[in-house]
Amino acid sequence: MEQSEIGAVRALLTSKPRPVGWTERRQRLDEVGSVWPVADDIKCTPVDVDGVDGEWSLAPGSDASHVLMYFHGGGYCSGSILSHRRLVTEAGRAAGMRTLALNYRLAPEHPFPAALADALTAWHYLRRQGIEAKHIAIGGDSAGGNLTLSLMGRLQQAQEERPACAWLLSPWTDLTMSGSTLATKDSVDPIIHGGYLHELADAYLPDSMDPKDPRVSPLYANLHGLPPILIQVGSDETLLEDAVRLTAAAGAADVAVTLEVWPQMIHAWPLWNAHLEPGRQALAHAGRFMRRCL
């Protein structure tokens, strides 16, 4: 890997201080996430997912009967279809399937359980479209990885069919913020820091909710019976231990889980796959995993 590639991404992320207001933060993530646009050969189509804004994407040669449903990151308070469009569409290309990206409701205007309710709505929408559960992969980065796990837990609790597999990119799995790498990786992570995560958790969680509740901290959930999971995380992330501990918990619950730790990579690095070779490589790995499972 050219050091200049990840260096350029780091420079992009640190070129401006993090804005204070939620509106400004959302604009900033849309700006840095969409700095490189979607490829010209991708077909994107907006869709009303039973009241949730969504977008289909399809790369040439992909199978429209198989779907990757993707939940963007942003700490439950920012992120959008726009900020993650390049990531989602290229993941669909790598997996050889159609994608459905969602603009689930954001905190603090819409705290828990709004995002989870929207995820469940989207799952039932797909099923009503005649798409079999075994033909669906679900995934997400950061808070989107959290939401992926929370949705699977909800389906498990309701004894509904679950997706064929899950792909978690830099997942935020513990809203108690007890992971040791929040401290040990703080100096090398350009975006995610403890104080910021506490602010996001405070915005997302109702006042009376325990941050250890498995519906918001899936690290503490019953993981038995979940489908195969691929977890990808960078070695320079404060959330590294969130991924490592989830891997251990899933393995202890007899879940087929694979952990990839990518050297020198930062939070959700495949967002910048257009000009970051390890981002493209990580998407290729995820694509192969989803093709095997589906």
Image (cartoon, grey):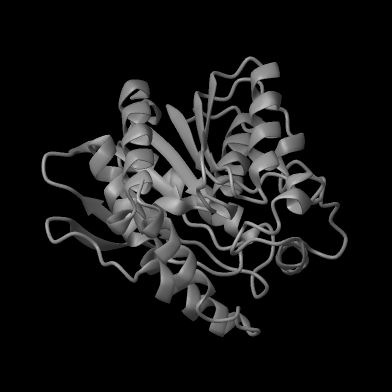
Where is residue 163 drawn, in percent x and y?
45, 31
Quarter holding residue 149: top right
Q: Which quadrant, please, contains the N terminus?
A: top left
Residue 214 x/y as whole percent: 75, 41
Q: Which residue lies furthest to the front in this view?
A: 3
- Answer above or below: position of 294 versus 26: above
One can see residue 175 in this view: no
x 36%, y 32%: residue: 285
In the orientation shown, which residue stands out farthest toward the top? Answer: 254
Nearer the observer, 268 or 69:
268
**Picture residue at 68% right of the left edge, 73% below the top:** 108
Q: In this view, does 175 lie to the left or right of 89?
A: right
Residue at 59 percent across and 19 percent down: it is 255
Quadrant position of residue 252? top right
Image coordinates for residue 136, horizontal then vertical, percent: 37, 34
Coordinates of residue 114 in the picture (x, y in percent): 62, 61
Tell how many labels.
0
Tell me if residue 238 can be seen: yes
User: In the shown orientation, is residue 242 left or right of residue 71?
Assistant: right
Q: Residue at x 69, y 65 (%)?
A: 111
Q: Nearer the viewer, residue 221 or 199?
A: 199
Which quadrant is home to the C terminus? top left
Front in this rendered view, residue 273 or 220:
273
Horizontal side of 177 relative to 23 (left or right) equals: right
